[in-house]
Image (cartoon, helix red, strand yellow):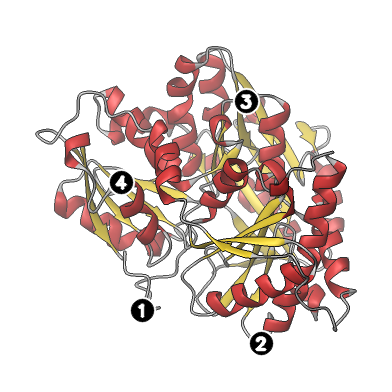
Amino acid sequence: MLGRVFKAYDIRGVYPDLLTDYMAWQIGCGSAKFLLNEAEQDGESTPMMRNVIIGRDMRVSSPKLSEELIRGITSAGASVIDLGLIDTPMMYFAINYLDSSGGIVVTASHNPPQYNGFKISKRKAKPVGESTGLDVVRKNAAMVDKNLTPQPGTSVDVRDLWKAYAKHVKKFLDLGERDDKNPLKIVVDASNGMAGTMCPKIFGNKGDATEGLEIIEINFENTKHEYAHEPNPLVAANLEELQAEVIKQGADLGLCFDGDADRCVAVDEKGQIVPCDIMTAMLVPYFLEQKPGAAIIYDLRSTKAVKEEIDKHGGKALRGRVGHVFMKQLLAENNAIFGGELSGHFYFRKNFNADSGAIAMCTFLSALAASGKPMSEMVSPLMRYVQSGEINFENEESDLALEQIMETYTERGELDELDGVTVDCFEDEGWWMNIRKSNTEPLLRLNIEAKTKEILDEIYEEVSPVLGSRVDH
């Protein structure tokens, strides 16, 4: 049973049917053992290295899971610093701010309310995924002695880091000459998630107009466990309320956060959704003006416009595999200033190479204020190609399908296997595509981009029969 809740990047399942309180205790034990061992291997022996930080989201099951997690951590001989209700990016800050061995957030991110889980980070807020320690945590958890109890000398310390965290986040906000007479007006949809706690703590109730920011809040209530929509901003239907409110209020921008507020999706002043790769491209000149020639990371599903903008502004463009584990590693290895992912995760060198919805919000607003243009004018030149969006196909023989794709297109375009199979015929035929396997389901995920819709439709009709049965949900 334990193995079924361990995913590629985190631990997740329906509570209490799949993910149980006992598992939370096991995972607390297994995580603490792993994090303490990793810290020791780094040669660190400071008192803070014996601490594991925990925090939780607003889900009804989170307090009980946190309680069992703490019991497990202290049973493994580590002390706990409990931050209470937090957005996930606050954990990345706290691990570095307190120099602890690592941390665990009780959250299921954008999943529906009946789910819950754990996101684990080690020293320096480095992510713990299947290839970076989650497999060890699983083995540790499975082998826990059932008779273990909290060890003598361990403690649980409740801390409030919101003031320090807010100071860190607001370093990324620069609204120039905006003030209470001419504030940026934005609508924020917290999805009844942790952004409903985070935004007022950092930006004040409805924003601080004296600092040039006015926030219209929707779906900020997160204590009644009622949800206006699923906390997933990548689903267009979940943005409809935000789009309508932006137009109604005459706002400059709309932003929607997922459940744990590590992802942020934008809507322009006309109520149009701005794809996350377009937002990455929009921020390229903003960051390269700060650090000329710097590397910028983008996930390989992104529009060609991202690389074109990085090249145009003199930066170093680096494609990355999909997933925060790979993006953060690539950012660190190349001292990159910024990274963007199609999923709405945005990464920042000055944020310990980690992603943050709050800091993404700050940089969106700073770039908008600096430009003096409406958001629609900033992004329209970047939306120069046609994209399919990610399309899923059910296929029990996904490896065979990928082999067939490679055989079919090997003489036709450039192929690489950085993440799945990418076929690039952009220069000669005006299109490229990426096909990846799902980490958790028998699915193939297709993304196509082309210079025209006619080309895109033609390639889709050509390739889709090889991929299996299309799944629309």
Label 3 crowd (10 A; few <14 / some 14-19 / many >=20):
many
Q: Sequence order check: which comes first, mark 4 or mark 3?
A: 4
Q: Which residue does the numbered mark 3 point to in the structure image?
A: 336
Left or right relative to 415: residue 106? left
The number of numbered badges drawn on the structure is 4
Q: CA distance from mark 2 to mark 3?
A: 42 Å
Of the numbered discs in the image, which one, if any, rests on residue 248?
Answer: none
Which of the two discs, 1 and 2, labels the residue nearer the N terminus? 2
Question: For residue 17, which numbered disc appears in the image?
Answer: 2
Farthest bottom residue in view: 17
Gap in Å between the C-alphas at discs 2 and 4? 38 Å
Residue 393 position, x and y percent, is 68, 63
User: Disc 3 vs disc 1: which is toward the camera?
Assistant: 1
- Amino acid type, callout 2: Asp
Whole-number angstrom distance, CA of label 4 to CA of label 1: 23 Å
Mark with earlier residue (2, 4): 2
Please determine whether, in this image, residue 50 is positioned above or below residue 433: below
In the shown orientation, is residue 18 left or right of residue 93?
Answer: right
